[in-house]
Image: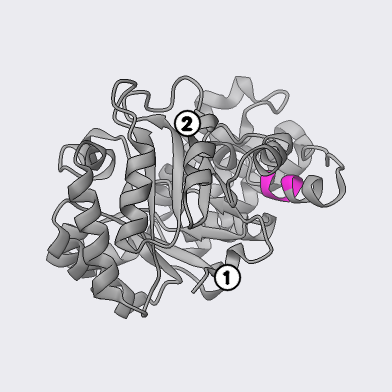
Amino acid sequence: MALPWFEHKFPLFLAPMAGVTDPIFRTLCKEAGADVMETEFVSAEGVLQAWHRNKKYVEFKQEHRPLGIQIFGSVPEHAAAAARIITDAMQPDFLDINAGCPVPKVVGKNGGSSLLKDLPLLQRIAAAVVNELGQDCPVTAKIRIGWDAEHICAPEACQRLQDAGVQSITIHGRTRSQQYSGQADWQMIDLCAGQCCIPIVGNGDIASPQDVKQARESTAVSGVMIGRAAMNAPWLFARAKKYLESGEIAPEPTPEERIHFMLRHTRMALDSGHYGTEIATMRAMRARLLAYAKGIPGTKAIRPQLSRVGSYAELEDMLLNRFH
């Protein structure tokens, strides 16, 4: 059965980003027009050993749907068992296998992009999860184009994942060794999209409405996933949709609108209780606030204060007194 978010649509995905795509941020991106979202990733071993502690990473609201939960792991049987626990408890719209994360703590456990060095294992993991979930939940995957420039494996990885029963694949157009440097290889993404019978979602260097339109018109991808650009400017989803629909480039939010957004995101995070105490929430928000403030005239001088802000009242005073 085709995944419904691809039917007669070109969906915009919010990338799963650890420490960023929490329920509050997903709510804001959904408001801005994100079509499909995923949770922060969770370890299959963590789910099996301490589900009660790891459940918080994959909690979501019904209005976030369609939504996927992303897992990583290196043992097929464990990945399948964790997928069953997650699916039964949370009932996501799909379950995504992480074979693209480049960070050492994931790669060191033979998860994430390390699976690109062992494609038969990646295929066994995908097949085990697909067989376990059956018709209960579609399975998707996210990969990079290879481990390094000498080991580009995306075409074979896609074929193996498709053979395992995965229903769509997101491809980040960089190798693991590139991390987030250099340019994403959209020619390789396009090659994979052209050879696959399932939808391919392109990811990497999508930073403007024009980038979204170019991906739709010049490649065979069925959608795009936006990560770092959304982290800095969640309103990109709305601007991209408007451009796709009308050809008009909507203006960036004004400095006043961005300041209001910063305060609103912080207030929502505090009200949700997701991070616990006010100081814990403010610590979690600091990176977000610094990202949102970038480019707002006059904020360069207060970046050191933003990186240490400890309360909502302090933030409000800092922003409203200076900019109003």
Mark 2 surroundings: few (<14), some (14-19) or many (≥20) residues within 10 A: some
Ranked by sequence position, the earlier of labels 2 and 1 is 1
| Residue 250: percent from left, percent from top | 83, 42
Residue at 16% across / 59% down in the picture?
76
Residue assigned mark 1: 4
Q: Mark 1 is on which residue type?
A: Pro
Label the magenta part by its dominant secondary structure: helix
Left or right of 159 on screen, residue 202: right
- What kind of element bears circle 2? loop
Asked if the magenta segment contains residue 239, the reply would be yes
- What kind of element bears circle 1? helix
- CA gap between label 2 and label 1 equals 42 Å
| Marks 2 & 1, CB-CB < 8 Å contact | no
Residue assigned mark 2: 307
| Residue 81: percent from left, percent from top | 18, 70
Q: Mark 2 is on which residue type?
A: Ser
Mark 1 surroundings: few (<14), some (14-19) or many (≥20) residues within 10 A: few
Residue 230 higher or lower than 24, as above or below: above
| Residue 242: percent from left, percent from top | 80, 49
Residue at 44% across / 21% down in the picture?
181
Left or right of 93 on screen, residue 261: right
Per the rendered image, the range of residues in magenta is 236-240
Asked if the magenta segment contains residue 127, the reply would be no
- Give the mark toward the camera: 2 or 1: 1
Q: Quadrant of residue 231?
A: top right
| Residue 63: percent from left, percent from top | 58, 72
Residue 62 higher or lower than 76, as above or below: below
Which disc is residue 115 wearing? none
